Image (tube, helix red, strand yellow):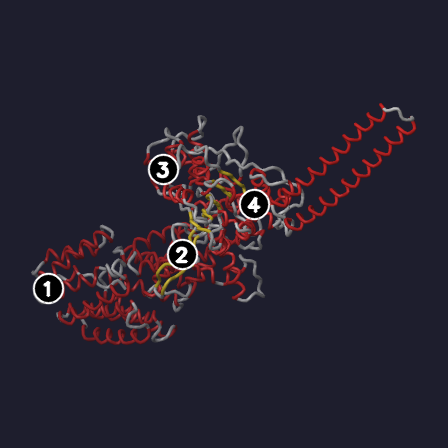
Amino acid sequence: MSYAKAAASRWSVVVVLGLIGLVMSTLVLLTVFLLGEGLDKADKWASIVGGYVAAASLLAAGSSWLIRRATRRSRKVDGDLLGAGWPSAPAGVFGSASLVAPAADAAPCVRGRDQHLQRLHRAARRPAGRVQVLTGLGGVGKSTLALEMCRRFARSKERTAWWVSATDISSLADGLASLAGELGADHVHLMAIRSGAPRARERLWELLRRARPGWLLVFDNVDDPRTVGVLRDSGLARCADRGLVLVTSRINQERLWGNDAEVVEVALLAEDDAAQVLVDMAPDAGDHGDARRLARDLGYLPLALHHAGTSLGSPFALWSSFDGYREALNELGLDRVLTTSRRMGHEADHRRSVKLTWEMSLTALAEHGLPQCRPLLRLLSYYSVAAPIPENLLHADPVRAVVGCDGSADALDVRRRVQEGLEGLADQSLIAKRDVPGPSGRERVLTLHPLVAETIRANTDGAVRTGTPPPDSVAPVYTAVELVTVTLEPLRFDDNKDWYRFGLLAPHVHALLRPADTHLDRDHLAQLVTATAHVVASYAWSGLETAAETLADEGLKHAGRLGETHPSTLHLRSERAWAIGRHGRWEQAQAELQRVLDARSQSLGAEHPDTLDTRHKLAWAAGRLGDWRAAEAQLRAVLDARVEVLGDEQPDTLHTRCCLAWAVGQCGRHEEAETAYHDVISTRERVLGKDHVETLDARHSLAELYVRHRRFRDAEQILQKIIKDRLRLLGSRHPETLDSRPRYWLARALRGQGRHREADRILRRLLEDQIQYLDPHHPAIEATRQQLRTGSGPHKDHSATPPVQ
């Protein structure tokens, strides 16, 4: 029914009632007249009664007509307006909702959001028929931006702002009914809106179009996909050319909002802006530098900054300074410190709690059929938040228990459950997805905010400490360890093609060591220690000896619970000894390797692959300490055993053959060493490939042999190509590219040809890189300095840097 027809209906009722009133007045006058006439008493009263009967009949007929007409129109209105109601909305009458923006404690001004506010002001001045949607992580400040726009509208008497809370279907319906009432809708229309009639919502937007233009309509916290569908499908954008329609939501799917919406993600604050928020709210708590450090710890999240600033700005603050607050965060934990006290006159708002805001998103996802989102986020929270998490880490089989798949589910079912869970978390801005360049193209990685991870992990850890963990609280950390272990297992630390994958996983091994003592049983702790040993080996082989030693020391702190002779502990001890040896401390390395060898020989036997690995390392340590004859004898024994156990062309066997060739050369048998090198190079090129780092290493060792044998031109050709190959394969900043040996030996080859100026230029540049990237006491630095000091004079071999096999 159109509004013109409704008005005509109201006028017809008025006319009928007027006629009835006129008839009744006439009858009263007639009664007075008859009583004054000289008629018989009976005739008088008969006339009066007859008149009233006729009037009563006319009144009854008119009333009946009005009732039938009203009923017909009511049914027509119901047919027009009442239809499919709000999904799962109650059928009763809603209470009246406030359309005034909520009062909130706020900093003196909004920081770091100038671009967003300018864009919204432009949209308000020149509405273009598109709904403005602010999305982002819970607590990032979407509602704060909307409140600021409402405050700015309130300063102008000619501009109107309405605020509709849309946390669920019911609150949206109540808010829309209140808005319709303010716009002059009748009772029938209000009831239709409250009942969720689709056409009633469309008519509401028509009323809004007729309102004075230049208004602001905010829909806050539209976090339910069903609510998004209601607003989108009802044609809300049709009125967005008359005012600014602004929506805040955690849902960042542009396709869900449709083509008539402009979806903009609100990011975290920049460091200076985040620090200024704290200074604004607590000016006496410290200087800007102190505020920056606290802002960094809080992850630049506006909600967390607001809580901290409110607490520090209180006249009864528990902590008096930014640094004091930081110390409390580290000592007491996020869940105990990062809260706001309840004050008189302020209603409790769970959305403003850092601890609960993300739990609400997880609950909503579970209610929408994605219960796997919660355990998935718990799983991800145990990894490093400072590094991207490779998505394919979640492709391994251990993840099936986390996403609720039993043994009957195939790999595709598991992958689909993981995909749906990750999409749900991303839709609520709890995680972010991005692509990064990898060796074989773009690779998808995941990131999550530090406070999200810490909050989710703190809830789990707290439940474990109190002895009342939920069913899935401990499983995620176990699965996190299993996934890393399974993913690392097929990788080889001596293969440069795998170094990229080791680099992605290494930060997460670091992070998992954090809760190892309190959350892991012995089996999972052993898995984690083994994974740590793999990463330590990759660090050492790729030129990151200091990082290898640091990680090994951290891992051994936790491995103590397993015992010094546990296989996983011995593995880590062996790799740590190798790392410190490559760092130049071969005496210390030799002593530790001997202890590991004794333990492995006793528990595993002399021919076990792990024991053979330690024997190889120990033989090389003997050579590096000057006893190359002993090294040669030990390496020959290891080679015979590896051929027997592993085969003649297995990579570890080839490694021993290459090291044996170097030992032979050090013993003065250059021709025998050269023949051995050519054999190793050809085999490695065939088995491993020409670009494998071990193939490059064998070529490099041959070049060094040529320098010692005064075949300088042959050495130069090999070394120039090795330097170019490393640059091509690994990039200019990789430790292996910055490795001192190729350029050091190239300089020696040039000196041997009398090209001292070229050699000095290479050595000076090499020394600059070594000082920048190597430990100050690294032996390679002294070797380079010694070569520069030697100049064109005689050179002693003790300054050389033999290959670190």
Q: Mark 1 points at which residue?
A: 751
Percent coordinates x, y for residue 288 in the rendering: 33, 35
Measure the alpha-carbon separation of dots 3 and 4. Answer: 44 Å
Measure the alpha-carbon separation of dots 4 and 2. Answer: 40 Å
Q: Which of marks 3 and 4 is nearer the N terminus?
A: 4
Q: Name the residue under label 3.
A: 275
Percent coordinates x, y for residue 438 in the rendering: 35, 62
Q: What residue type is labelled 3?
A: Ala
Q: Is mark 3 on a helix, strand or loop?
A: helix
Q: Is mark 4 on a helix, strand or loop?
A: helix
Measure the alpha-carbon separation of dots 1 and 4. Answer: 88 Å
Q: Name the residue under label 2.
A: 434
Q: Residue 204 carries which label?
A: 4
Mark 4, other Cα within 10 Å: few <14 / some 14–19 / many ≥20? many
Q: In this view, does 540 lie to the left or right of 188?
A: left
| Quarter of the rendering occupied by the C terminus | bottom left
